[in-house]
Image (cartoon, rainbow, N blue to C red):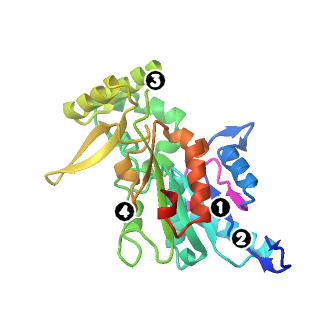
Amino acid sequence: MNLIDSDKSVIEPIPIILIHGWRPRKRDGVLVEWNVMKKALNRENIPYFEFDYLPATGDPYTYPADLDKFIFDIRASTGYTGKFDIVCHSMGALVSRFYMARGDNYNGIRQWIGIAPVNHGTAFADLIDSKRILYLLIKPFIYLYFKDIGSSGAVANMRTKDTQTLELNKSGPKRDGIMSGVTYRTILGREVPSKSQFISRIMGAVEWLVSSSREEYASYQSVKESGYLPTRVKLTRNGETIYKWTVDGDGAVANAQSILNNIEPDIISGVGHNQLTKDPTVIDLVIKYYKNFRDRKSLK
């Protein structure tokens, strides 16, 4: 890990740990989710390590122990004793934040950057709790294909009402999920054009099967007709929980479920959930955050 500067003194740059989300992109069984990001980091001579917890289909609360060992092994093999930056995507936000909330692990993290993070779960995952008769009839066939959707799977544990996630967001000195001494960033997608009419029709059929109300289904149709990819969002209205579909999301996670308390997000228009990790604007932001992590004004 050590680099030698022009004065022959030893310096230790902060390494980044890249943490993928649920079912990340693979090629021939090899993780490729961060390939574009890694090329950019290499060009900037920014050191990084890639945390691979494939197949990434289990409860995100179970993976922090693996991340703990991963970081321990880095320190043991390199002799590095400093802090790390974390760059995570989607479910990787929960994995990394659960890790930081364990004991004093947060003391080893300088900066946390969440790309399309499921900080409060995703209302899309809440669909598995639908009580619609037609959905209950096809549910066994869905479970045959997505065997991890059940109570011990990642999808079930990314529901907005997941007990562990609710507790996580009450951690920290202010009970807002923010750990002391860590700089937080969130990068979100919004207003994603609906490019596939076929997929849009399939999703419309799924929403008809599982929608909790006529109002919810009407909101889905409204967003779809506007030409954008609908994202399911959980809202509270007059003390009552409701679900709607919105353009304020990346197709998988609504901005309302990604935002952390008092952390101003960066919004990337027109980029969907699975494209954000390789989007040049996102990558440029990550590099700027790395180099100027205390000076947010310099990034505007």
Give whichever of discs 1 and 3 has the lower sequence position: 1
Residue 166: give its label.
4
Task: Identify the residue under disc 3.
Answer: 199
Kind of residue sitting beneath label 3 = Ile
Q: Nearer the viewer, mark 1 or mark 3?
A: 1
Task: Decide if residue 285 is on the left or right side of residue 171.
Answer: right
Task: Identify the residue under disc 1.
Answer: 17
Kind of residue sitting beneath label 1 = Ile
Q: Nearer the viewer, mark 2 or mark 3?
A: 2
Q: Nearer the viewer, residue 187 or 163?
A: 187
Give whichever of discs 4 and 1 has the lower sequence position: 1
Local SS, label 2: loop
Q: Nearer the viewer, residue 227 or 172?
A: 227
Local SS, label 1: strand
Q: Are marks 1 and 3 in contact (CB under 8 Å)?
A: no
State which region is magenta.
47-62
> Is 52 located above or below residue 76 in the figure?
above
User: What whole-number distance in Å separates the C-alpha atoms at marks 2 and 1?
Assistant: 13 Å
User: What whole-number distance in Å separates the C-alpha atoms at marks 1 and 3?
Assistant: 34 Å
User: What whole-number distance in Å separates the C-alpha atoms at marks 2 and 3?
Assistant: 44 Å
Give whichever of discs 2 and 3 has the lower sequence position: 2
Residue at the spot 71% in from the left edge and 79% down from the top edge? 81
Q: Residue furthest left?
A: 238
Local crowd at mark 3 within 10 Å, few (<14), some, or many (≥20)? few
Q: x and y percent of residue 181 in the render?
A: 50, 77
